Every structure is written in structure tokens, then in C-alpha cells.
Image (spheres, rainbow, N blue to C red):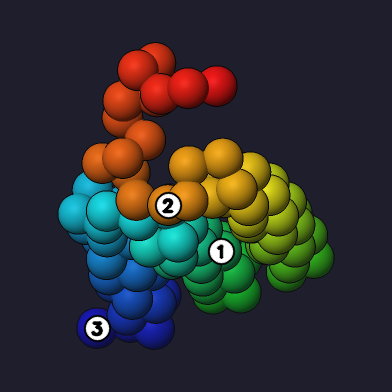
Amino acid sequence: MSALTLYMLAALLLLAIGLVGLISRRTLVGMLISVEMLLNGAGLSVVAAAKLTPASDAIGQLATIFIMGLAAAEATLVLAMMVVVYRRFDTVTTSALTTLKDAKL
């Protein structure tokens, strides 16, 4: 097996773990970690493809930095949302948040 195939399989594994975690987690923190795993898998595949193919290394690194910036912005936004939800409802479990229209605002 080539190195590119191994890296792509590792990236696919990260993507699969993130997707399964996103579907199965009950808390917003668990979902956040799962989305981070998804984005890490995407970044790994971009870097591996740029390094191990004739594509430009600089373009691959720039794309990965963009993915990392997107992950940081997403994490900041979700953490801020979790703080607001916790202050308002005293929980961050998604089962309690599905009945938001019945709750007092």
C-alpha cells in the first residue's frame, strides 16, 4: 500500500469516528468534539494529498490552515452558544433542548 492510501484511510477513519460521534452523542460538548474530529480528518486528507501528489505543497498547507481556522471559529461559536444555553436552561443535553418552544423564554 502506498503512503497516500494509508493517510487517506487514516483520514477516513477520523471522518467516520466523527460522524458516528456526531450522530450518537447526547451533549453539545460531545457533538463539538465529533465535529472537530471530522475537520481533522479533512485537514489530514488535504495535507496528505498535497504532499504526496504533484500538487503544490503550499496550496495544501494553506487549505489546511483554512480548515483549522474554520474549526477554531466553529468551536468558539459553539462554546458561546453552550454558555447561553446553560445559563438559560441549566443543561447542555440535546434531549432537554428539543422542547425549546415549550420552555419559558
Horizontal side, residue 58 vs residue 20: left or right = right
Type of amino acid under label 2: Thr
Residue 69 against residue 99 in the figure, above or below:
below
Mark 1 vs mark 2: give the one in front. Answer: 2
Q: Which residue is mark 1?
A: 43
How much space separates mark 3 and mark 2, taking CA atoms?
A: 47 Å
Residue 14 coordinates in the image, percent (x, y): 35, 69
Residue 7 in the image: state x and y as whole percent.
39, 77
**In this view of the protein, which residue sits in the foreground, 60 or 35?**
35
- Look at the image and tell me whether residue 34 can be seen: no
Which residue is labeled 2 in the image? 91
| Quadrant (top left/top right/bottom left/bottom right) for the C terminus | top right
What kind of residue is marked 3?
A: Met
Q: What residue lies at 39% left-to-right and 16% top-to-bottom? A: 101
Instruction: Tell me: 14 left or right of 54.
Output: left
* Residue most extreme to the top: 101
| Disc 1 from disc 2: Cα separation | 32 Å
* Mark 1 residue type: Gly
Question: Residue 2: percent from the left, percent from the top?
Answer: 33, 82
Question: Going from the N terminus, do you reach mark 3 or mark 2 first?
Answer: 3
At numbered mark 3, what does the secondary structure look like: helix, strand or loop? loop
Upstream in sequence: badge 1 or badge 2: 1
Q: Is residue 73 left or right of residue 5?
A: right
In the picture, residue 100 is in which quadrant?
top left
Quick check: 7 left or right of 39?
left
